[in-house]
Amino acid sequence: MAQDLRGALVGFCNPLLDISAVVDDDLLAEYKLKANDAIMASPEHAPLFQTLIDKYDAKLLPGGSGQNSLRGAQLLLPANSAVFFGAVGQDENAQRLKAAADKAGLRTNYMVNPDTPTGTCALLITGHNRSMVADLKAAETYKHAHTVAAENWKDIEAARLYYITGFFTAVSPETIQTVAKHAHEAGKTFTMNLSAPFVPEFFTDKVLDAMPYINVLFGNEDEAAALARALKLDVTDVGQIAKRVADLPRAGARPRLVVFTQGAECTVTAASDREDMRVFGVTPVPSAEIGDTNGAGDAFVAGFLAQYIQGKPLDTCVEAGHWLAGLVVRQIGPNYPDGDLTFVPANAAN
């Protein structure tokens, strides 16, 4: 009998419209940007967004890391499985974001701020690298009161798995704590993503506040290294970092799983109830087939969670994450292929 997954997955993040363009190294240098990074916009970045539109034939794409992940997960799950929370303005860009969510079957529970424009994210693509500069605008006005309002809290109560990106630590840490504690007290699953190196670097205390409640933590190798530095861990190996983080204090007896991806390299996992680390190989996407890598990490989480929420084994969850990420990097921007998306595990015939 099929599981009833209606409203089972709830996510929180910053819904942003991506302004994506292929650029040259000179533009990166002009704005002092790294080729493969994610930062928050400062006043000196203000002209960048219009420059991409005026001079680089930018494309406007639905984005925001958490909404990307929930769109992908919903595409792989039964109808009405996922609900996304975040803040948008009352403008055309918000309509674009909602249209993309609607297309994927993802229900949005936006807090609408009529006084502030919907946030945007500049995506500067050079080769297979992407540099992200986020201007949160309405997204950073999200209020904890929206989460706990009776008409919205019912979505929290109905869910069985919660996913919150590290980006949200800069917006509503109170919401993170409320949802995390609810998940713990109700015996549900709370998951987070480190999201970018600046999150563990500059919001270390917020990450540590959430850590006792985190059942599954996602990140990539750069974020893992940033977390290790922030926590003053005496290890640099990604697998060893994963194990040390898995063993950090927990609010209950339930084990913690840490999943660190490394792009086209292997994915490493560690758990608090296992001494060994597990390594999962990645089937590389041929260079000629890569559109850009933006959204690959979001897609990995989408594929992983779509299996995890159904109780599938870790091998299957990671395989689904790799599979969906491989499809997304063949697109331009954080887009999923049109048509039916059906994941078939490699061992399905066994």
Image (cartoon, rainbow, N blue to C red):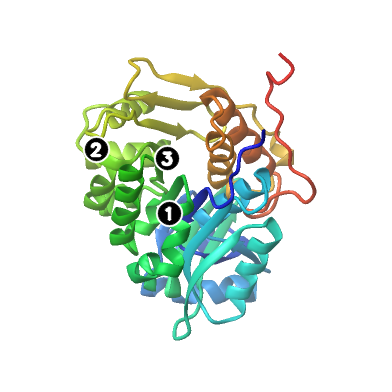
Residue 302 visible here: yes
Residue 199 is marked as none
In which quadrant of the rendered image does the N terminus lie? top right
Residue 219 is marked as 3
The local crowd at label 2, few if under 14, some if 14 to 19, many if 20 or more residues have their Cα within 10 Å, is: some
Query: Along the horizontal axis of the image, is 101 left or right of 236?
Result: right
Residue 157 is marked as 1
- For the residues labelled 1 and 3, the Cα–Cα distance comes to 27 Å
Which residue appears at 24% of the width and 38% of the height?
Answer: 251
Compare residues 187 and 322 and report the one nearer the observer. Answer: 187
Dot 3 amino acid type? Gly
Query: Which picture quadrant has residue 144?
Result: bottom left
**Residue 140: x percent and y percent?**
38, 70
Mark before the other along the chain sequence, 1 or 2 = 1
The local crowd at label 3, few if under 14, some if 14 to 19, many if 20 or more residues have their Cα within 10 Å, is: many
Which residue appears at 40% of the width and 19% of the height?
Answer: 277
Q: What element carries label 2?
A: loop
Residue 251 is marked as 2
Q: Is mark 1 on a helix, strand or loop?
A: helix
Compare residues 152 and 339 and report the one nearer the observer. Answer: 152
Query: Along the horizontal axis of the image, is 248 left or right of 50?
Result: left
* Front tag of 1 and 2: 1
Which residue appears at 61% of the width and 38% of the height?
Answer: 3
**Residue 311: x percent and y percent?**
54, 31
Dot 1 amino acid type? Glu
